[in-house]
Amino acid sequence: MSLYIKSNTPPTNASAQANEQGLLITLSNGINIQWDKSKIHKSIIYNNGNYGVQYGDEPIEKFETEDKSVIINLQKTHPNYGFQIPKKASLFKSATGFVLIILFIMLFLVGFYTIGLDWIAKGVASAMPVSTEESIGQSLFESTVAQNKINLGKSKLLNAFFKQLNYPSDYHIQLTYIDSNLVNAFALPGGHMVLMSGIIKQMKSYEELAALIGHELTHINGKHVTRSLVRTASAYILISTVIGDATGVAAALAENADALRSLQFSRDLETEADEKGLELMLQNHINICGMVKLFELLQKAEQQSPSDFLSTHPETQKRIDHLKEISSHSPQNKGNKPNSDPNLQKLFEQIKSSQ
């Protein structure tokens, strides 16, 4: 099908033939229209299977046809005029190229989300001063933790217990005891550590409490908490920016504050917290079996009722096996027996009491 199109008039069925003058168009009513070759536009249009030839200045006349031979004959008849015939293949390549670009962008965003954000978060956390982390941690504590039922008496005992442990830190560590049935504990940037009564009630020895504190302290000392918060906030900001949701960008940090209790760390960071927690116990002559017993106890509790702590600390059995393997090669199994600390035992009993 071929059409002759002129502005302000309906399209008319037509045919066309290249000649010495240019292009002769014959309308369905028999009228001939001669186009001069010098006024025929050199760029031929291709769209949805139709070739289009344009003629003159405004108002431009057009001839559209499915018959490519008309265009080829025009080019052959006037080779010196440089009529450019688009190829279907070139359009396909263009469309394919566009799709590939979109796929590349998507893969880049996925890669950036999974790898780039980790790299950025680690860099930001490493460069962040302790004072800044403490300020962030305090703000988060006041906006989230302070709203819970804090047991001031047992918080005081927890801090005394921590002081007796003699675990080193560049941060001013503050432990808070919350009366809650949740089996959970978590740390905030800059030194705040929150332990819930639900997890402490499951413990049978002070070594287990020392293990839990050592684990969470490693998250603080290693800036794991800050790093994870930055990563999660960056993910919210990236996604919100891509979809154009300015509200999501503004709310990113607020949403992360509410997610503190279920903050998840990578497998590597959890392994580091386990291993360095054991090192802290060894350095202070505390029985490292407490770390294994802690996770065994929590795993058992998880079977009875869901545990927020274990839900954010995956692959518990593998971690227990790994801790047992490390413990089997520790100095404590080679004659260097751990000490029994009566002060820690007394404080633990007071924390565990119903008072």
Image: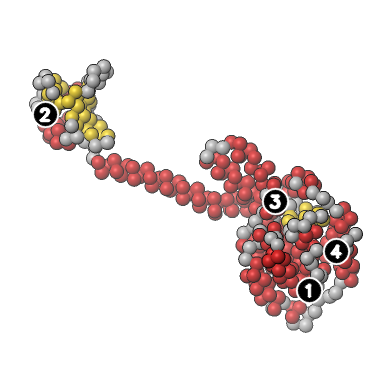
User: Residue at coordinates 71% horizontally, 68% vertically from top-left?
Assistant: 300
How crowded pointer 3 is (Cα within 10 Å; few <14, some 14-19, many 20+) is rated as: some
Q: Which residue is mark 4?
A: 352
In terms of sequence position, does the residue under pointer 2 or pointer 4 come before the other? Answer: 2
Which labelled disc corresponds to residue 17? 2
Mark 1–mark 2 distance (CA, rounded to whole Å): 98 Å
Name the kind of residue labelled 1 in the image: Asn
Mark 4–mark 3 distance (CA, rounded to whole Å): 25 Å
Which labelled disc corresponds to residue 260? 3
The one nearer the camera, 34 or 199, is 199
Whether residues under marks 3 and 1 lie with C-beta atoms below 8 angstroms apart, the answer is no
In terms of sequence position, does the residue under pointer 3 or pointer 1 come before the other? Answer: 3
Specify the quadrant that holds the C terminus: bottom right
The one nearer the camera, 125 or 233, is 233
Whether residues under marks 3 and 2 lie with C-beta atoms below 8 angstroms apart, the answer is no
The one nearer the camera, 98 or 130, is 98
Q: Is residue 138 visible?
A: no
Disc 4 or disc 1, which is closer to the eye?
Answer: 4
Q: Is residue 26 visible?
A: yes
Task: Name the secondary structure under disc 1.
Answer: loop
**Residue 94: x percent and y percent?**
32, 42
Disc 3 or disc 1, which is closer to the eye?
Answer: 3
In terms of sequence position, does the residue under pointer 3 or pointer 2 come before the other? Answer: 2
Task: Name the secondary structure under disc 4.
Answer: helix
**Residue 96: x percent and y percent?**
34, 45
How crowded pointer 4 is (Cα within 10 Å; few <14, some 14-19, many 20+) is rated as: some
Name the kind of residue labelled 3 in the image: Leu
Mark 4–mark 1 distance (CA, rounded to whole Å): 19 Å
Q: Which residue is mark 1?
A: 287
**Residue 141: x percent and y percent?**
77, 47
